[in-house]
Image (cartoon, rainbow, N blue to C red):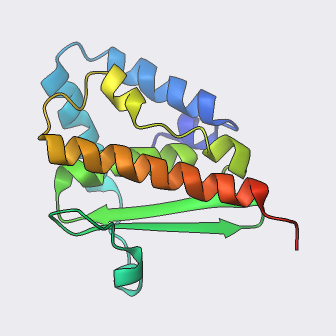
Amino acid sequence: MTSDSANAATFAARRLHWEQHLRRIADPQARFGQLVEHARRRPPLPESLRREEFRVSGCQVRLWLVPEFVDGHCRFQTDSDAVTLRAFVGLLCELATELPPAEAAQVDGRWLEELGLLRQLAESRRATILRVAEQMRAFALQQVAAPPP
C-alpha cells in the first residue's frame, strides 16, 4: 500500500485511494498486473504463521489468513502459493488492517468485482476471494460484539 493509503484513518478512505489509483489504469489486464506487482513487493508471511490453523479451507492451493485483534485494532496477514490470491486477498488485508473493528468490518470482496478485477479469474479463485473477505468481516464483527476485557 502506498504511504497515503496506509495512513488513511478509515476503511472508506483507503478503499477510495485504491479505487482512484486502479481506475486510472484503463486496461483491466494492466490493473491486474499492478496488483500482482504490488503483492510481489509485500513481505512473505513468516514461516511461524504458516500453520494449518490459519489455512483457508476449501482452497486448491495453500492460502493463509491470520486475523488478530491487538490494542483495539484488527490486523490481517495473508500469503498464498497462488500469486492471484496473494494479490487480491493481500489488498483486502491492507485495506482492513490496523483499523478498529467497526471500520475493518466494511471489507467486502464484491468491491473487487465492481472494479472488474475478478472477471479474469477462475470461478474457484473468485469464490475463495469473496469467502476470505467474508471471514475477515466476520472476525471484525466478532471483535465489535466482544465485551471489553
Using the rendered view, name the quadrant where residue 60 is placed: bottom left
Q: Position of residue 108 (x, y in %)?
A: 48, 37
x 13%, y 26%: residue: 29
Residue 6 seen anywhere in this rendered image of the structure: yes
Q: Is residue 139 above or below residue 8?
A: below
In the image, taking residue 2 as reference, residue 29 lies left or right, namely: left
Using the rendered view, name the quadrant where residue 41 is placed: bottom left
Q: Out of 4 and 27, give the one closest to the viewer.
A: 27
Residue 87 seen anywhere in this rendered image of the structure: no
x 17%, y 58%: residue: 82
In the image, taking residue 146 as reference, residue 38 lies left or right, namely: left
Q: Position of residue 140 (x, y in %)?
A: 63, 54
x 41%, y 28%: residue: 111
Instruction: Indicate the quadrant containing the C terminus: top left, top right, bottom left or bottom right.
Output: bottom right
Q: Is residue 9 above or below residue 94?
A: above
Q: Out of 146 and 83, give the one closest to the viewer.
A: 146
x 45%, y 63%: residue: 77
Using the rendered view, name the quadrant where residue 83 is placed: bottom left
